[in-house]
Image (cartoon, rainbow, N blue to C red):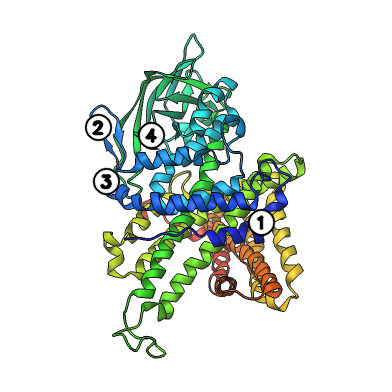
Amino acid sequence: MPIYKAPLEDVNFLLNDVFQIDRYDNLPGFSDASADVREAVLGEAAKLSEEVLQPLNRVGDLEGCSRQADGSVTTPKGFKEAFKQLAEGGWLGLSAPVEYGGQGLPITLSQAVNEFQCSANMAFAMYGGLTMGATAALIVHGSAEQKAMFVPKMVAGEWTGTMNLTEPQCGTDLGLLRTKAIKQADGSYKITGTKIFISAGEHDLTENIIHLVLARIEGAPSGIKGVSLFVVPKFLVKPDGSLGARNGVTCGSIEHKMGIHGNSTCVMNYDGATGWLIGEENKGMQGMFVMMNEARLGVAVQGLAQSEVAYQNAAAYARDRLQGRSLSGAKAPDKPADPIIVHPDVRRSLLTIRAFNEAARAMVVWTALKSDVAHRSSDAKDRQEADDHMGLMTPVMKGFLTDIGFANAVSAQQIYGGHGYIAEQGMEQFVRDARIAMIYEGANGIQALDLVGRKLPRDGGRAVMSFFNEVASFAKEHGTNEAMKPFVTPLSTGLGHLQQATTWLMQNAMMKPDNAGAAATDYLHLFGLVTLGYMWTKMAKVVHDKIAAGGATSYLTTKLVTGRFFMERVLPETSAHLARIQSGSATMMELAAEAF
């Protein structure tokens, strides 16, 4: 059976030492998240994930969700009880505003908890994650009445939330959607249409489900400019907050899919369902983007989370599995063979995964802190800088962390050999579950196009130039430190490749847009590699300082070796990405469609 242990030591190292979270005590909610509170929250989150959610991961995969004759959906055994524990523990409201029943703690803390839960049971964690995203959209764009009616119940985990975008004929291109909304005399709307791939669309975990639905009001402009956002509850809500009649929204079927079987991915049929407009008519994407950006960061964490749990299991297996002898002589002469951890290629795979995980986790904490600043700071300049960072890094994190997270799950499976292909070991489930993260909330190719087409030139390139300056300044500041050279030198080289790629795009993409499309995915991965290199360099500086101040520990020395491995063996991939980017799009676009 698979194992999972929440990486508490690593999270605390990042929060306390690398990013010094106590420096943010001037922001609302941070002073409530003192060191002892953080320790208690993370400790309990780890316990819940390890002892309650992880044992249900295999159960959910085997049982899946089942649709009943009346259209209701039954979740796997144990999910309902586990969700009750999640709700009663206040986990859904950890970072929600206090005025709606939340605890108002930093988003940074929630993202750490999110990683634990997604590693333990990704399909289960999606029920709460989608609810928090829907709650965020309502808080930003909902009316006072809508907030009062829906948000407290969602924060409390009494009701859950969904996002309904995709239709059979449209996914990324939401301007093609056909679901229609007809305004009623009382100001409500009747929503009719079909939505597909709706995660947590129907289930038995809570008594009500609050759907956020994109639809087109009769007479609205065509395309994306005519799309509006509506809140459509499964059960109508009476003025006193109690539940009324069943609304005209039902689960038509459950999608049969590759992974995340424990989450009910539904075809949702809206047949004159009653809904209420969120925000302004034809401005639905504004509200949906709040939820989508929340979801994209959550999906990035899913990529890290599956990589982490796959690594933990592969490392444990490699220490125990006997196969062959070490190239340099037997390491376990009293046994018939050595454990496979002695083989360089196994170590290459494990260190590649581990080096990604630790830097990706730093990137998540770094960006989560920026999100807290963007939402909570009273300083306009700080908010702008944080918002710039979020805009730039969201597609990088979503695309890069999920691409590499899936690849790492496959690498971890490979360490098991044939046993990794057998379901009882659990490794093939990590691979199947990780695969969806590259697809939903905007397929990764779209994230790459968003990065090069919109995020780079936004505000005259202000965000990307700020990133370049920050990384270059850090490298310059520590470049003369002999101990830091194994980190600073390759980081500077990688940054140079990223700057060259950016300049090439500026010079070659305007006149020939296909050059941008051809370069997009390589550019996103190049950006991701440099960002992880920057995270490793920041961590290395802290580790060297701590060793100088108090001596080496096993954790600190292991951290340095892992970081050096990344700089030596992973970061040099930036040169290959640069070469591909600079080759342009000519060969890629030369063949006629019929030739494929």
**Residue depth check, mark 1 versus mark 3: number of the one nearer the observer:** 3
Side (left or right) of 375 relative to 194: right
Instruction: Spot the residue most to the top.
Output: 185
Task: Relative to 460, say whether 505 is above or below.
Answer: below
Of callouts 3 and 2, which one flags the residue occurring earlier in the amino acid sequence? 3
Of callouts 4 and 2, which one flags the residue occurring earlier in the amino acid sequence? 2
Real-space Cα separation, disc 4 to disc 3, in angstroms: 18 Å
Task: Relative to 436, say whether 228 is above or below.
Answer: above
Real-space Cα separation, disc 4 to disc 2, in angstroms: 14 Å
x and y percent of residue 302 in the render? 47, 51
Observer able to see residue 439: yes
Real-space Cα separation, disc 3 to disc 2, in angstroms: 14 Å
Task: Relative to 149, say whether 563 is above or below.
Answer: below
From the image, tell me which residue sits under label 4: 201
Circle 1/circle 4 CB separation < 8 Å: no
Which label belongs to residue 63?
A: 3
Circle 1/circle 2 CB separation < 8 Å: no
From the image, tell me which residue sits under label 2: 68
From the image, tell me which residue sits under label 1: 507
